[in-house]
Image (cartoon, rainbow, N blue to C red):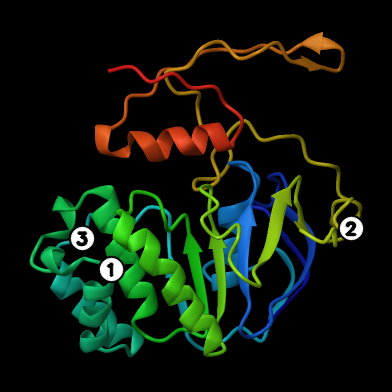
Amino acid sequence: MRLSNVSFRYSRRGPWVLRDVELTLTPGSVIEVTGRNGAGKSTLLRLLAGIVPPSRGTIADRPGVVGYAPDVFPVGQPFTVTDYLDHMARIRGGSPDAARALAIRLNATHLLSQPLGDLSKGSAQKIGLIQSLMASPGLLILDEPFAGLDEQTRTELPLIIEELAAGGGTVVVSDHQNQLQNFPGADHWLVENGTVTSRTGERSPASAPPDGAETPQPSASPPQGDRQPSVSQGDERPSAFQNGERARQVVIEVLVNADDADDVEQKLRADGYLTRRTS
């Protein structure tokens, strides 16, 4: 699969999120995608999955079966978990038996009779993973798959990824928690300033906007899914300077569910924010 001169923006006059990206994904590869929130990681994953087309450039030789698990699973659907998975199996040509086998591996069998709307974030994440895997995808795209998962599932998911890659599948994972940082043989991409850089320093040639367009300024409101997070329950940030002047900083309080607090705090710290937990 190859991305050639791929650029993307969400509107005709909007800022370029990705510019002139050149990437090649080989069968059997596992790729960890990192970068700050708002850099374009989720956008890159949607392009790879075929959910959105590039604004410019081409994406060729995408595998015929693509599995995609978004970072936020859409629980607002009138199904039980079993009904949803059976419905997705009919649409995608997967097997209900495969879905139930995955439910066993991901410690999710107790969820099968529950309505989707009753699922916690971690439970919903498991169902998103099951639907992405049950049709034996040639390309698997996972956006923050480890968020909210229990220890058993955190241990099992890398094994599933390894099995899929060993069978010739390609796996791309965006992960704030760096669970695949030491995954054997994995490639690592950094999304930053509209470019994609590999761990070896190979950089997508994106130093200038396509066709001589003006260099985009940072967007005040990044597209949904690539939003810059707010500082959560934080102390004042250390002094910072931009262009020789002290940067303006604020403290923003964010109220989260206690079960999600660890994941939210890890993401904020990974993005360079200081946090302070309060009860």
Q: Mark 1 and mark 2: span between their CA atoms?
A: 47 Å
Q: Mark 3 and mark 1: span between their CA atoms?
A: 22 Å
Answer with mark 3 or mark 2, whichever residue precedes in sequence.
3
Report the amino acid beneath label 3: Gln
Q: Nearer the viewer, residue 182 or 36?
A: 182
Q: Is residue 149 left or right of residue 103?
A: right
Q: Residue at x 10, y 61 (%)?
A: 114
Q: Are marks 1 and 2 in contact (CB under 8 Å)?
A: no
Q: Residue at x 86, y 49 (%)?
A: 213
Q: Is residue 79 visible?
A: no
Return the x and y of residue 159 as percentages of the image width and height: 44, 73
Q: Crowding near pointer 1: few (<14 within 10 Å), some, many (20+)?
A: many
Q: Residue at x 22, y 49 (%)?
A: 120
Q: Tell me the SS state at disc 1.
A: loop
The label number, if any, that marks residue 150 in the structure image:
none
Report the amino acid beneath label 2: Asp
Return the x and y of residue 132 as percentages of the image width and height: 38, 74
Q: Crowding near pointer 2: few (<14 within 10 Å), some, many (20+)?
A: few
Q: Crowding near pointer 3: few (<14 within 10 Å), some, many (20+)?
A: few
Position above or below: 129 against 178:
below
Q: Is residue 83 visible?
A: yes
Q: Nearer the viewer, mark 1 or mark 2?
A: 1
The label number, if any, that marks residue 211 in the structure image:
2
**Residue indicated by mark 3:** 77
**Residue indicated by mark 1:** 106
